[in-house]
Amino acid sequence: MNFMDRFDFWCNANLPEDVRMELDSVKNDTEELKSRFGSELEFGTAGMRGIMGAGSNRLNRYTVRRAAQGMAAWLSGTDLPKKAAIGYDSRHNSEAFAKVCAVAFAEVGIHTYLYDRLAPTPMLSFAVRQLGCGCGIVISASHNAGAYNGVKCYGPDGCQMTDEPAAIVTKEIQSIPYFVPEKKSFEQFMDEGFISYIGQDLWEKYYETILGEAVNPEIIRSAGLDIVYTPLCGTGNEPVREVLGRLGVNITVVSCQEKPDGDFKTCEYPNPETDAALAESYKVANSAPCDVILGTDPDADRIAIAVPYNGGFKKLSGNELGCLLMDYVLGARKNKNDIPEDAIVVRSIVSSPLADRVAESYGVTMNAVLTGFKYIGGEILKLEEAGEENKFIFGFEESCGYLKGTYARDKDAVVASILVCEMAASLKKQGKTILDALDELYEKYGHYLAYVQSIELTGADAMEKAAAMMTNLREAVPEAIGGAKVTAVRDYRTGVERNITTGNETPILLPRSNVLEFLLGESGSVIARPSGTEPKVKFYYTAVAADRDSAEALLKKMIDQMSV
């Protein structure tokens, strides 16, 4: 079926007037029709995400319903509990899409628990486990612009869905026709008890649980900590302010980003990885007491911080904050003689190896996993199945995602906000700042500077170009990058690490993935990783040197060489 066939199919369906008007408005725009109907919106291990609107390659009540029906069919064919939990964020249509999903589950006898108001993604992960559900869904597009929304899918362990069940769901979706009418309304299923709202008691249990993850919470009140906080018009406003308020943090909220706003008018791209996401916070912090600026993304699973510096503010990278939080948590637990034997911390392979040095100094094992927080959750699951979940200390990704505790299996900006405030308060009591602590890490372990470069490719053959770039890197391994000799190559697709000098090969004990890593001895590394859904290749650089100037010079040479 080509794009015009799909368009005609939609036009001939019995659709509401507003949808028919939208279709009519694009009928003479060939490029728009190709964009909307050239393919089906793909369902992957993280669910699906796309621009909202009418069309098979858009997120709308029909594509969302099919995705939920596919998940319901998968769950019905398993031995898992026939229960599901659903949460949603502040984006346009999020609540409506959540109700569409709830109805799709209820139609096949799956009891569905729906949050009674917008809630962070980690609270959905928490609910799946607390309510004994077989799966869960969050309606969110994370940090994407306001035109987007998405369906994030979770398994019974509270982790994002893994490859095997996702493949089954995809197959089920493909067999489900569009526009199958709902058997009953959301309200009717509510009256019959197939759908229930998640009440305040679970919110309170979540609060109590994450407050229990604090290491030394009493220090916050005594330090008189002042923060400026922005929820970026998303879900963090209520839970972050609640838990920090209970701990005695003095909070100034960025008022123009306090309330939910699916248009994100004051922050077009609400991604905490970017400095621009905190622009409004800087304005507020110029006139308000501020030790730290906190910003959480719209579904509050990621967090960024900035601190006063030279009359302005300096935003920390996700790697810098991850290493600082890990060092703080391990140091605080060591002082209490509270680090269990054989404890582990976890990072993604594209996150800073500085974290390995920090972990080693505390006698803790670092496990490096593939990119995606589900792999960090998988490490927790292994420990849980062995009855040793207490051995998990901390996990993080360079993209501003952090987790302490095993109550959820996804990154959690709410618990991270507690840890940031506790760390900042502890340093304040010592007459230090967060930047002082960062400098101490670098002085102790070396200057590990990281940079992420995204090379976007264009044209009809853009995806083929991305694949060719990876092939060329595999076939023509550089002798040196930025003047640093390539000592080994890790190919995560073949599962082999090859020593360049000796030719010896050792297995990589991780799932296969199209990722290539060039190791530069003690000088750092370069990792190449293509996007699975977009025509781009990401390069993750780490430059290591004894001082910052040398590390910056090496990093620049590395980037310049790989950008040619």
Image (tube, rainbow, N blue to C red):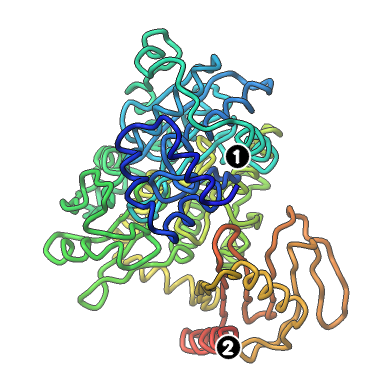
Q: Is residue 461 above or below residue 127?
A: below
Residue 366 falls left or right of residue 315: right
Q: Residue at x 13, y 60 (%)?
A: 288
Residue 505 falls left or right of residue 540: right
Q: Quadrant of residue 412?
A: top left
Q: Quadrant of residue 495?
A: bottom right
What secondary structure is marked by label 1? loop
Q: Residue furthest bottom?
A: 483
Q: How many marks?
A: 2
- Give x and y (percent) for residue 406: 54, 38
* Crowd rating for badge 2 (residues with CA inside 10 Å; few <14, some 14–19, many 20+): few
Q: Residue at x 54, y 43 (%)?
A: 47
Q: Quadrant of residue 118?
A: top left
* Residue 436: mark: none
On the image, numbered disc 1 is attached to which residue? 161
Q: Residue at x 31, y 42 (%)?
A: 21
Three-letter residue code for mark 1: Met
Residue 11 versus residue 37: which sits nearer the camera? 11
Q: Is residue 397 above or below residue 433?
A: above
Of the numbered discs 1 and 2, the one sitting upstream in the chain is 1
Three-letter residue code for mark 2: Val
Residue 420 versus residue 502: which sits nearer the camera? 502
What secondary structure is marked by label 2? loop
Is the C terminus in the top left, top right, bottom left or bottom right quadrant?
Answer: bottom right
Residue 461 versus residue 155: which sits nearer the camera? 461
On the image, numbered disc 2 is attached to which residue? 564
Q: Is residue 215 visible?
A: no
Q: CA distance from mark 1 to mark 2?
A: 38 Å
